[in-house]
Image (cartoon, rainbow, N blue to C red):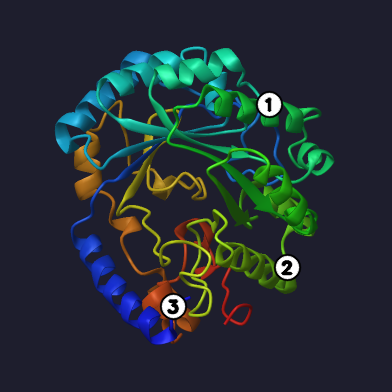
Amino acid sequence: MLDVNTKIDNMKTLEAYRAGLMIKPTLRNLFLELTMRCNERCLHCGSSCGDVSSEELTVSQYSKFLAEIKGDFGVDNKMLCITGGEPLLRKDFFDIMAAANQLGFKWGMTSNATLIDESVAKQLKRVGMGTISVSIDGLEDTHDAFRRTPGGWKKAMNGIECLIREGGFHSIQATTVVTHENIGQLDELYKIFNDMDLDSWRIINIEPIGRAKQHPELLLTDDDYRYMFEYIRNMRMKGEPVTYGCSHYLGLEYEREVRDWYYICTCGTYIASIMANGNITGCLDLERRPEFIRGNILRDRFKDVWENNFDIFRKNLSDENEKCSACSEKCRCHGDSYHSWDFDKHEPQLCFKDILF
């Protein structure tokens, strides 16, 4: 554990670094939403994916775009983050990722793993997948109910086992969205994951976005939040590979205690995203509002959009709210994460002040 003064000094350095990023952003993570289609109907889905009919880019369009990215930005220190929907629903998935791999991009994927068998695992290694994060949201009955997919838990666990047996991947991670209904299952989940050869376990809280807004009974209470962060911190103190996600400023007590880095929202400074139809935005977890669509790769050069049309993502949200602007933590929080900001009320939908600090 770091002492408070060290944390304060580190976060002052981070504040100055963030200010520099606002002026000179550096693309590191490019998210590709290959499809809005999904074979699950998760109660928390921020993008409301499922049985969705929407435009999807072709293999040749992705190949042309990625070649352009390589020419404009290079591939060093770049990561393609492949997501959906469920990416593996695309019949041409391996053609797209083979093209990315041939261009030299490193890439990882978020998946529900229900479509992964021995053959798919081999194919994933063939086209260069380095990392994968698989969603396991509770014990079997809880997971299947939450994802509204009978048999989903068994299929996902089998998918993980197929990946482990195949081997050769940099990281196989399980991600658990913690809700008011599954928070009591963390110890049992840990025992299951500990018996597997997983590289890490990422724990994140359900966010008040997307479908989750229709299910307030799943949102965490203040006591739930405190329990979750204490659980993660205690596991990490034991040397276990458990981490919290990237979202939210947690206050001096928990910053650097539950993840390897300090809070910083990099939407629009490290991160950009391409929606399934080619629209360019900052973060795929953002509310799908017209003002966040900054261009489309079918008609705009991404480099021009990134350099000249991303200002909406490069500001301090705390300046837009009187309470936030007067907060003593604003230099560390900056209004918190873009994806959980209410752009109609101009206030954070989730703030840990008075909950954790």
Q: Is residue 15 above or below residue 133?
A: below
Which mark is drawn over residue 224? 2
Residue at 62% x, 32% y: name it.
Answer: 112
Q: Nearer the viewer, residue 253 or 69?
A: 253
In this rendering, is residue 183 above or below 161?
Answer: below
Q: Residue at x 31, y 60 (%)?
A: 314
Kindly report which numbered mark, 1 or 2, lies closer to the viewer in this rendering: 1
Kindly check if marks 3 and 1 are in contact, taking CB atoms under 8 A apart as contact: no
Task: Give residue 310's position: percent from left, percent from top.
Answer: 29, 51
| SS at circle 2 | helix
Residue 295 figure quarter: top left
Mark 1, residues whose alpha carbon is within 10 Å: few (<14), some, or many (≥20)?
some
Residue 70: mark = none
Question: Quick one: label 3 or label 2, which is nearer the N terminus?
Answer: 3
Label 1 and label 2: CA atoms lie apart by 30 Å
Q: Which residue is mark 1?
A: 158
Relative horizontal placement of residue 113, taking residue 263 as reference (left or right): right
- Residue found at x 73% / y 55%: 186
